[in-house]
């Protein structure tokens, strides 16, 4: 799956690699950040003209070019095998260079926050690669363990406590990293910038390039839109009343696992045309001009279409059809079908002739004849909706007023999903579901980078080295036959055990107080009681 595509060519990448061999890692990261290319490819304008003469669609008999399936599902640069773990698959999408760039930009952004809020980040230490992975591991785990407030994850209340969060990272450290998370130096943004995703720095184009070179696409490509919920202040925020979230950032997604036509050509222009692919999309994208333009590039199209976009064919759609009836028209290259079901459905395609197939149902009243284009569309369309359906219950997105942070977590979820799809391709018989895959991913991240925090609270009593190694408390002195303090004052004096009921028995004689200046104590302890290194309050 890819959100847009990256338009960097191979020559630029090779020249960048040669220059990087002579640069330090920090310089290479800064060069990649400052010399950032445009994320969104240049939109394509459709200039195709179509035949305006439409006749009977039953005479449409196309001969599309046969699609040649790839030899493998992964690109050569994708080094994955049956032994690859979930974390290894994820790091093929988000590598160490991308993580180092995020850490560098976040550390550089810290003085900006301190200048605005002098009391903030008092205990801040530079963000490292290990801490970033722990931070993202906990953020991903928050998508599985749902709680109302971030602070609840560090609660010690036995009703809602989750100890793994406190063992991995302190609450203040987690919130500080969330606050300083940054991807692009604001001083490097050029005047008159038109790239709306420049706030994501080099992370966005690098991730898009990884997605594009992740899996070799099959015959059918599914294109659809997805809305990331966001209600904050943002110039390109959209309002879509038909969506559940209504407000948010719209992404156009090309699903290779399973505005308008210009969007389709923009997504396909880099590496997907002239390969006999079958593109499936809904009526938001479909127009006869788009289908004609794709035919010129040896790419075929199937989708629903709005009646008002059917050019001259819509003039023949004046009569209302009865339920189950169908009409079809063709201009020699494109077939348009109009079928009346529970409501009217219009289909457009360039590689299938008109034919009907009986669709059986468990309810005999629902058995009906359907166009083959409708059956194929129902089986192939919905790949993008499946992505949202699978990832939505376990999203790692947290509430934030910074839109680019929310987009980052949205892209992170898509990277995790792509890793899951790659895992399913490598293990076709695996019954592991997405949630189980995410749990394994989080466990692997925390096990690899988990370091227990230092001691917090009252400082431990630390005697000097000479004093600690003196007296019969030291094991070597005890093994030489000397009496031990425990044996003399607990065993020979017959002191009752702590768990014994005899201690509370009032008939037992009272024991003499424990005195430090007795000959027995001085015999067993080579310690000067008047020394400043060893002071004991005898009143206790």
Image: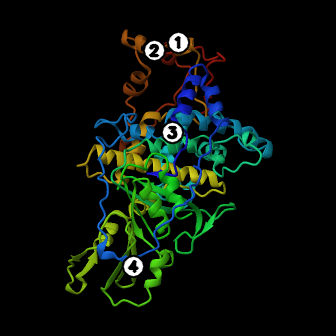
Among numbered discs 1 and 2, the one appearing first in the sequence: 2
Q: Nearer the viewer, mark 2 or mark 3?
A: 3
Viewer-nearest of discs 3 and 4: 4
Question: In the drawing, does residue 505 fall left or right of residue 137?
Answer: left
Q: CA distance from mark 1 to mark 4?
A: 98 Å
Kindly indicate the quadrant of the structure image that contains residue 121: top right
Residue 259, percent across and down?
57, 63
Q: Along the polypeptide, which appears first: circle 3 or circle 1?
A: 3
User: Does residue 118 lie above or below 403 as drawn?
Assistant: above
* In this picture, residue 360 sits left or right of residue 54: left
Residue denoted by label 3: 133
Q: CA distance from mark 3 to mark 1?
A: 52 Å
Which residue is tagged 1? 526
Considering the numbered disc 4 on the image, is that residue within a helix, a strand or a loop? strand
Q: Secondary structure at mark 2?
A: loop
Which secondary structure, mark 1?
Answer: loop
- Residue occupying image coordinates x 41% and y 39%: 87
Of badges 1 and 4, nearer the viewer stands: 4
Front: mark 2 or 4 = 4
Q: Position of residue 219 (x, y in %)?
A: 33, 53
């Amino acid at each position: 799956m890819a959100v847009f595509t990256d338009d960097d060519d191979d020559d630029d990448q090779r020249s960048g690699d040669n220059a990087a061999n002579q640069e330090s890692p920090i310089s290479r990261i800064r060069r990649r950040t400052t010399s950032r290319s445009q994320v969104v490819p240049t939109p394509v304008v459709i200039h195709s003209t179509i035949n305006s003469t439409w006749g009977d669609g039953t005479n449409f008999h196309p001969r599309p070019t046969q699609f040649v399936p790839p030899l493998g599902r992964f690109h050569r640069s994708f080094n994955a095998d049956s032994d690859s773990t979930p974390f290894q698959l994820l790091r093929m999408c988000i590598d160490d260079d991308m993580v180092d760039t995020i850490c560098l930009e976040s550390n550089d952004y810290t003085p900006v926050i301190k200048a605005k809020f002098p009391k903030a980040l008092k205990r801040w230490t530079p963000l490292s690669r290990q801490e970033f992975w722990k931070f993202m591991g906990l953020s991903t785990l928050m998508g599985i363990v749902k709680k109302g407030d971030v602070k609840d994850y560090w609660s010690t209340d036995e009703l809602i406590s989750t100890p793994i969060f406190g063992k991995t990272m302190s609450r203040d450290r987690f919130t500080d990293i969330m606050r300083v998370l940054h991807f692009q130096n604001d001083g490097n943004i050029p005047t008159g910038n038109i790239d709306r995703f420049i706030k994501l720095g080099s992370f966005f184009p690098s991730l898009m390039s990884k997605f594009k070179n992740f899996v070799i696409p099959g015959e059918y490509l599914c294109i659809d839109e997805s809305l990331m919920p966001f209600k904050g202040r943002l110039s390109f925020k959209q309002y879509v009343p038909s969506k559940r979230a209504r407000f948010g950032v719209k992404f156009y997604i090309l699903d290779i696992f399973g505005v308008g036509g210009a969007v389709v050509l923009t997504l396909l222009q880099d590496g997907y045309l002239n390969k006999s692919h079958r593109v499936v999309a809904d009526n938001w994208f479909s127009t006869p001009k788009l289908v004609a333009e794709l035919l010129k590039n040896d790419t075929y199209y199937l989708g629903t279409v709005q009646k008002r976009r059917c050019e001259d064919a819509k003039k023949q759609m004046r009569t209302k059809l009865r339920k189950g009836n169908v009409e079809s028209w063709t201009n020699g290259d494109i077939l348009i079908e109009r079928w009346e079901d529970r409501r009217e459905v219009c289909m457009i395609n360039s590689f299938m002739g008109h034919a009907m197939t009986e669709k059986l149902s468990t309810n005999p009243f629902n058995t009906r004849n359907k166009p083959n284009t409708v059956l194929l569309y129902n089986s192939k369309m919905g790949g993008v909706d499946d992505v949202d359906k699978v990832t939505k219950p376990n999203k790692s997105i947290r509430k934030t007023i910074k839109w680019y942070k929310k987009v980052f977590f949205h892209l992170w979820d898509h990277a995790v999903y792509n890793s899951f799809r790659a895992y399913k391709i490598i293990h076709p018989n695996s019954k592991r579901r997405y949630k189980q895959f995410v749990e394994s991913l989080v466990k692997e991240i925390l096990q690899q980078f988990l370091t227990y925090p230092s001691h917090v609270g009252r400082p431990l009593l630390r005697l000097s080295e000479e004093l600690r190694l003196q007296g019969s408390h030291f094991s070597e002195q005890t093994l030489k036959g000397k009496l031990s303090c425990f044996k003399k004052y607990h065993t020979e004096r017959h002191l009752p055990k702590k768990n014994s009921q005899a201690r509370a028995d009032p008939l037992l004689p009272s024991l003499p107080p424990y005195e430090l200046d007795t000959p027995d104590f001085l015999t067993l302890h080579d310690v000067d009681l008047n020394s400043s290194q060893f002071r004991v309050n005898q009143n206790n």
